[in-house]
Structure formats: structure tokens, C-alpha cells
Amino acid sequence: MKRSGIVLLGLAAMLCLPACAKAPEAPVVVQKNNDRLIEKAASEEENRTSLQEAQEETPKDYTFRYTSTDGKVSISAEADVVLPDTDRIPMYQLSCKGFPQEQITAIYDYLFQGESTWYARDNLYYTKSMADEDMEEIRSQLEQLKADPELAPDRKENQIDYLQDALDSILTSYESYPDEIPKVPTDSAYQIRTYSSVTGTGGYQYLDARTDSGKSLLVLSFTDHNAWSSLEYTSQTGYQYNADPTQADFNDPVPYGSDVPFSCTYSYEDAKALADGLFQAAGVDARLIQTELIRGAWNQAGRYENWSLAQEDSYSAYRFCYSRVIDGTSVAATTSTSLYLEDTNPAWLYERIYVTVDSGGISNVYWSFPVTLEDVVNEDVQILTFAEASRIFEEMAPLIYQGKNAALEEDSGQSAQEIVSVHNVELNLMRTRDGGGLTGLYVPAWVFYGTEEYGTNLSGEHFTSHSPWIILAVNAVDGSVIDVKAGY
């Protein structure tokens, strides 16, 4: 795997550290191999124990403090430590084969509740009347622009060109737009389409279902060479909410319970019951891991090529974040979408599951990178103790984040800072991939969740991670650090 532009975890991270940095005693990031991990999980070692023994010995909370000698990196932990409430923790083989048809049918039935659905033949969703409205708006902005005496000539020229290009593009294709959307009745059955990419060619399953009331469900389900399967549902009011909060979020999310003005016809309990019902229908055991309150927002046309953001005055919806539960153990979740540059392997991010509920009911569903559970390879894995996992964290986290900070300084040419806070530690199952392929394992892992704030001191720009965010994950089988970007 080629990796450039981002400091690697583990050994590569140490190369960026000051000479005084201590080399770790713990295992560092290494590429996982399914067979090796399976063999390791079956062995018995002194520093590994059963889940039941770990439940008895693990403290309820964890504290840690670290500040680098130059003061640029600080790491703190005031965290609850949570273990599964079950007798055993397993290891499974897994793959990514999209959403099964029977699961999509169940979700379709739950969301549409018998309402008739359709799609537009040849994706002809843009009509002549829509084009007329857009052209009228563009022409109006062109008139305002040409009459604007305050705009600099070069800026005015660029904006005139921008708007004129947009107008010409619509005019060129105008006759191809239908007078009305050609609606084709549909149900939950997949259509088969083909694709071609750098990873190869193949077929994928596709569902586009819409209603006259304004609901829509779009499913892309890949079964080979590609892990980018996704399910997106939007209700009549769903356009106000960003379905995928791992992208730019304009809904100003705040944790549930925050003191903000909030108005929704559903209580928290009723809204959660609606969201939970989706997974019950789909036959997926899921756990709610985070609830946020969000407010509606939408882009509105501004002057010339600019757009402005309109937002509701009060918060109006619950956004629930879920993860799978396998044999009583939650699967690790993160909002990270980072990949190594020049990585030519198929992208396989961690599964993301979000359901938004507003006064109209379920307004948005976003579910991407679903996993397919294969054979169980070990029903009762012996795991590293929390004492050993925390020791590895305390040795590796300073090295990793000093390395990231050094890389940021090298790229920006400015002094930088990393502030890392751990809020909770969980014993989860975490997906590791077998090299660059699309198969892997669910392995037990001690996952340190929290927030990461980083940025340059001179520019004053700082970026904060969006939870759930994995600060560091220790493989509870072999003690190595799992590289969240690489997936192993």
C-alpha cells in the first residue's frame, strides 16, 4: 500500500519525533493478517484473559495526563470504561456485500408505509418548467450584476462569465428536458447496473424510489470490487438536514440535553422508538451510541454566484447515531473519512448509520459501508487486560500525536498544536481488513474515544473532530494499534 501526505501511525510516526522521544515498548502498527490473528486468538497467553475476568478486574474509570516537553501536544483522559454486558466476546470473519434484497424490502416497507413509489425514466428529474425558473433567476442576477457600480471590474467580469456559462448550459440542453417527469412505477426490487472504476468493472444493485409527497429512497449496493454501498432516505422535510454528518455539517449539532431552544412533536422516547424500529424491521441488532439535536438549514440564492445559508431559529430534530451489536458486543464507530493519499486499494471506510427524526417522523436515514457477517472463527476470545491496553495507549498516543503535529508543522510552515481528550473507553468489536482486500475480521479492541483539536498557532485556525471519534484503538488480541485510516 502506498502512503504519502499523511504521517503513518506507529513506526512512521516515530520518525517525525524529537530526538528525546522515548521509543515504545508496546507493539506498534503492523499490517494485520487474518490467519495470523485467528491463530493468535486461539492461543493462551499470560497477559490475556477471559471477558468475565476482565469485567471483574477493569476499573470503572480511567485518568491520564501528558504534555510534550515543548508544550505543543497535550493528551488527557477523564473517561468511563465500558465493557460488554455479556459472557463472551467473539471474532468473526466478514466482508462487504452491500444490502441484501430482503433487508431493503423491509426498510422500504417501514419507511413508505404502503405509499406508491416511482422513479424517473432515464433520470429525467429536471423539467422545462424547472429550467425556466432557474433561467429567470440567473437573468435577474445578471441584470443586477451589470448594474452594480461598486464591484471591481475584474470580479464583475468573472461573475458575469460564471452566470452566462450557467445560462448557456441550460439553454443548450433545454429541448432535451421533459415537459413533465416521466414517472415509472416501482417497488422495492433492485435493478442491476454496471460500473467501471480503477478497481475493475462489475455490476451493482440499484433502487431509486420516490413518492408524490416528496419522499425518496436511493440505495447503491455493491457485491464485488467495491465497498461504497449506501442507503439514503429523505422525507418531505429532509432537505433541511445533512443526512451524512461526516460531511460538512450546517445543522449546528449539539449533544442531546443541551440548553438550546428545541421544538419537535416527538418526545425523545418516541423519536428513538421510530428510529429503533428501522433496525427491528431490517433484522439488524443495533445500539444507539449518540444523540444530537440539530436545526434545519438550507441554501438560498444570494447575489450573483454566491449562496447564503438560512437556518431555523430553534432546533427541530433528533439525530441518532447507531452501531451494530454482534453477540452482545457493540461495533466500534467513527466519523473519520480520511484515507491515505495514493492508496490504490478499494476504499473501505467504517460503517456509518444515522437516523434523523423531526416533527414529521423519520426525515433522514444515512447508512454506508454495511458489513456482511461471515463465519465465526472464535466464540470466546481471550483479550488483553485493560491495564495492558492503557499502558500501550500511554506509550503510543504521545508518539503518534507528536508525529501528527510535526507533520502539520512541516506542511504549514507554522507552529502547530494538538489537544487530545479521551472521554470514554469501550471494549468493542472493530473491523480490520485483510491487507487491501474487501474481507476482514471483527476483532476485540480497546477503543479510546474522544475529541482531537489541532491547528496552527500563527493562523489561529483550529479544527475539532466530530464525535464519535477514535483517538486510538488497541487490538485486544495482539496489542497492536489499529490504523483507522488503513483499516488494519
Image: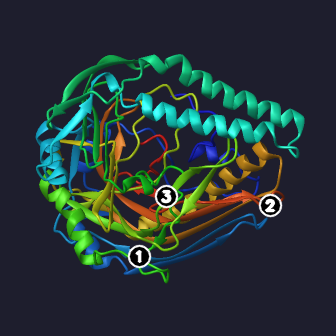
Residue 29 in sight in this render: yes
- The furthest residue to the bottom: 259
Q: Residue at x 83, y 52 (%)?
A: 414
Q: Residue at x 38, y 46 (%)?
A: 350
SS class, disc 2: loop
The mark closer to the camera, 3 or 1, is: 1
x and y, in percent, of residue 365 in the image: 31, 53
The mark closer to the camera, 2 or 1, is: 1
Spatial CA span between label 3 and label 1? 25 Å
The picture quadrant where one finds residue 130 is top left
Do callouts 3 and 2 mark residues in contact (Cβ within 8 Å)? Answer: no
Give the residue pinned by disc 3.
Answer: 472
In this picture, residue 378 sits left or right of residue 308: left
- Tell me which amino acid carries mark 3: Leu
Which colouring convention does the figure follow?
Answer: rainbow
In the picture, the quarter occupied by the C terminus is top left
Q: How crowded is mark 3: few (under 14 residues within 10 Å), some or many (20 or more)?
A: many
Considering only order in the chain, which callout, 1 or 3, is on the residue closer to the N terminus? 1
Residue 97 in sight in this render: no
In this picture, residue 404 sits left or right of residue 28: right
Spatial CA span between label 3 and label 2? 24 Å
**Would you place residue 326 above or below residue 207 in this image?**
below
Give the residue pinned by disc 1.
Answer: 256
The picture quadrant where one finds residue 434 is top left
SS class, disc 1: loop
SS class, disc 3: strand
**Would you place residue 365 above or below residue 192 in this image?**
below
**Would you place residue 137 above or below residue 68 in this image?**
above
Give the residue pinned by disc 2.
Answer: 457
- Tell me which amino acid carries mark 1: Tyr
The picture quadrant where one finds residue 75 is bottom right
Considering only order in the chain, which callout, 2 or 3, is on the residue closer to the N terminus? 2
